[in-house]
Amino acid sequence: MSIVIKNLCKSYKKNLVLDNLNLEVKEGTLFGLLGPNGAGKTTLLSILNFLIPKDSGTIEIAGKSLDTNQKEIKSICSIVPQSYAFYPKLTAYENLEFFASLYGLKNEALKKRINYCVEVCSLEKYINKQAHSFSGGLKRRLNIAIGLLNKPKILYLDEPTVGIDPQSRKYILEVIKEINKKEKTTIIYTSHYMEEVEYLCDEIAILDNSKIIFQENKEQIKNSEFGYKNLEEMFLSLTKQDLRD
Ligand SMILES: Nc1ncnc2c1ncn2[C@@H]1O[C@H](COP(=O)(O)OP(=O)(O)OP(=O)(O)O)[C@@H](O)[C@H]1O
């Protein structure tokens, strides 16, 4: 098992966001994490990536406790956040070089890894251009390339296709599939685009009302007694249709 979460709780002051949440993610899965706005998806990913502390509960990543193995866990995980996580005035290459050096990469190893990430995300033509001049799709691809620098065994992607055109989106979805297939990377993918999750993910979970209210293999969802036309219909039926503000 790649990730095992038991009884995870997190509040922001009086707002209880995660309430005794339990979740298991198998190694090598392309895992879709769905939930209405404000359900706590980013909060969960932030806890898993040491960006914010949990209140209580246990988390094991690749068999190691999150409480006592920060360095080892950080070395095998990477998060691509919703926001752009690069320096706009640096070129794509300077950004990649900077983040690669934070992982301790140097000389040939650094160049080799950057070249790989540039190729996977198709950034060759833009490598010497400042990141602020990039289109939305290119910015998303640079964000992902940075997330791949440490060869993560577990990659967290927080809404990586927001605000981009269908061409860029299709390209990014294929990149994600390939990383999962070729590198056997476990991928946790959050998105509000149901058709994307339906296309991409092997397993799907829904976070709502502070808990995982549903988790199932995609093939089971398609074939089984659930009887929904598609993922969107199932999502709306399980989470109800009230607006979440
Ligand atoms: N730093 C913070 N301080 C206080 N409250 C926060 C903070 N971050 C998030 N929240 C609140 O916690 C709840 C969960 O937010 P979170 O961003 O984790 O949800 P989400 O599922 O990622 O939402 P979205 O789909 O809109 O990105 C929301 O009510 C949000 O307002």
Image: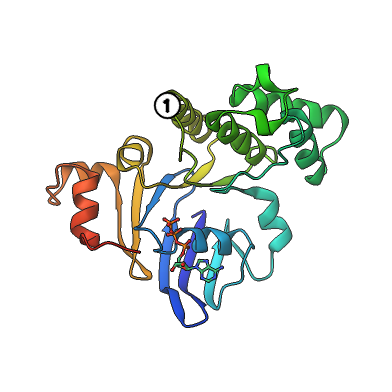
The kind of secondary structure element at disc 1 is helix
Please tell me which residue lies in front, 219 or 99. 99
Would you place residue 12 above or below residue 157 in this image? below
Q: Amino acid at mark 1?
A: Lys
Res. 200 image quadrant: top left
Please tell me which residue lies in front, 169 or 101. 169
From the viewer's perspective, tell me whether residue 211 is left or right of residue 105: left
- Identity of the residue furthest to the bottom in this view: 14
Q: x%, y% of residue 199?
A: 33, 35
The residue singled out by tag 1 in the image is 170
Image point (25%, 41%), residue name: 219
- Identity of the residue furthest to the top in this view: 125
Q: x%, y% of residue 231?
A: 24, 45
Would you place residue 186 above or below residue 238 in this image? above
Image point (18%, 48%), residue name: 233
Q: x%, y% of residue 8?
A: 48, 73
Q: How many marks?
A: 1
Please tell me which residue lies in front, 225 or 15. 15
Q: How packed is label 1: few (under 14 Cα within 10 Å), some, or many (20 or more)?
A: few
Image point (67%, 34%), residue name: 132
